[in-house]
Image (tube, rainbow, N blue to C red):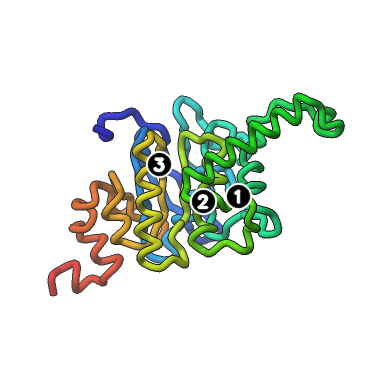
Amino acid sequence: MRGDRAPLLRLSGVSRRFGGLHAVRDVTFEVREGELLSIIGPNGAGKSTLFNLITGVTPLSSGRVWYRDHDITTWPAHRVAGLGISRTFQTTQILQDQTALYNVMLGLHRSSRQSLWGAVVRSRRFRADEARRRSEADDILRRVGLDGLGATGAAELSTAHQQRLAIAMAIASRPSLLLLDEPTAGLVETEVDELMRLISSLRDDGLTILLIEHKMRMVMSISDRIVVLDHGELIAEGTPDEVRRHPRVLEAYLGASHAHGQ
């Protein structure tokens, strides 16, 4: 049971203010090892800001963040990533003028053991390491359903394939926690279903996933648990069945009259 597993990530009283505006206010929850936890909420609820706080892109105004036994509250983004936390963005960070394979190989650079001098002179060790990374990048592309597209320019890929490439780049660093920020944006329903199967399979392989997503059918189908934000505050947390019946969730999405059965 995933619910019996130890927390991988813990947030306690996390807040972020921009001037007088609370983008995130006193948010507390945990992500358990091996689960898929979704964060949902109306536009402007603070979901992407919360991702930025977790990954060190934006500093907290108050509260604490722990990853395993590490208090990462004040850690910069590169140090957080070094712990095994990787993410995608609403606007993908893909290099459009490079091939799909090159983009994934960039994600593998942390596993390279070569010196700068070795790269300059293209030593035998450098060439062997480059071949290893190329083979590994091919395997990752195959894992996300992009087999045979390594030589294709990223700009030539469809929206659905670019979303898969963004995931491939994120998992290239071998993270233990993957943060996905609206990975189905711009996809049609059949493509959503296919991506949903990929994300579920990554979780089934043991990867812990924190997902921001607007498509409720997908969220309810693949999530182990769901956290709901509204105006920066956590208003509900639980299983998909618990969340879909929660009065405050109904009110946030449908209005007070639906929540009270009027």
Circle 3 packing at 10 Å, graded few (<14), some (14-19), many (20+), is some
**Residue at image point 41% right, 45% down:** 210
Please tell me whether mark 2 sits on a helix, a strand or a loop.
loop
Circle 2 packing at 10 Å, graded few (<14), some (14-19), many (20+), is many
- Residue at numbered disc 2: 146
Q: Give the amino acid at mark 3.
A: Leu
- CA gap between label 2 and label 1 equals 7 Å
- Mark identifier at residue 150: 1
Instruction: Specify the quadrant that holds the C terminus.
Output: bottom left
Q: Toward the viewer: 254 or 167?
A: 167
- What is the tally of numbered marks visible in this picture? 3
Task: Give the left or right position of residue 222, taking residue 168 as reference.
Answer: left
Instruction: Specify the quadrant that holds the N terminus.
Output: top left
Task: Indicate which disc, 3 or 1, sits on the residue closer to the N terminus.
Answer: 1
Q: Are marks 2 and 1 in contact (CB under 8 Å)?
A: yes
Spot occupied by residue 41 in the image (x, y as percentages of width and height): 36, 60
